[in-house]
Image (cartoon, grey):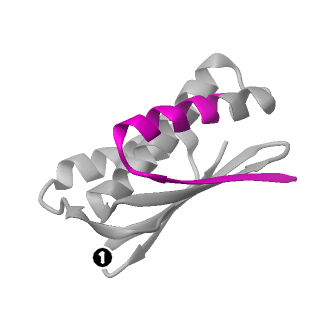
Amino acid sequence: MEKFSVQLPLTGEYLTTVRLTTGGLCALVGFDVDAAEDYKVCVTESLLILKRNGFISAAIEFTVGEALGCKVVGKEEGGERESDNEIEAALSVSLLSALVGNVEFTKEEDRVVAIAFEG
């Protein structure tokens, strides 16, 4: 099993780069086009959840083997916390659960600080 990790600011330009990187890793483990797109959505949505929880950067660790694992962890705090949009947060959680099934959310002080899943 191999690991690939990156730390990035949670801004639009870097989110596009992460989607491209995720697509390459999905191809490496043999995902079809639809499964790869679902996985890219999950990675992007996880980063957006962390951004809405006040993080301005995040670390992503992919585990490449028979499956593709992903753990996204909020790193640098200091961003605006968007606690007023509970509907959007619930949609994000539902989307992740629907696309990859088993998703683990790590919370501290009523906010998500890490998300892990496998595809």
- The quarter of the picture where residue 22 lies is top right
Which of 96 and 58 lies nearest the eye of the viewer? 58
Residue 92 vs 110, above or below: the answer is: above
Q: What residue is rendered at 46% in x and 32% in y? A: 16
| Residue 67 coordinates in the image, percent (x, y) | 78, 43
| Residue 24 coordinates in the image, percent (x, y) | 69, 29
| Residue 87 coordinates in the image, percent (x, y) | 19, 49
Magenta span includes 4: yes
Residue 27 vs 69, above or below: the answer is: above
| Residue 19 coordinates in the image, percent (x, y) | 53, 33
Reading the image, the residue beneath label 1 is 110
Residue 98 visible: no
Which of 7 and 69 lies nearest the eye of the viewer? 7
Quadrant where the image shows the C terminus = top right
Which of 72 and 91 lies nearest the eye of the viewer? 72
Residue 37 vs 47, above or below: the answer is: above
Residue range highlighted in magenta: 1-23
Residue 111 visible: yes
Which of 73 and 87 lies nearest the eye of the viewer? 73
Q: Secondary structure at mark 1?
A: loop
Q: What residue is rendered at 32% in x and 82% in y? A: 109
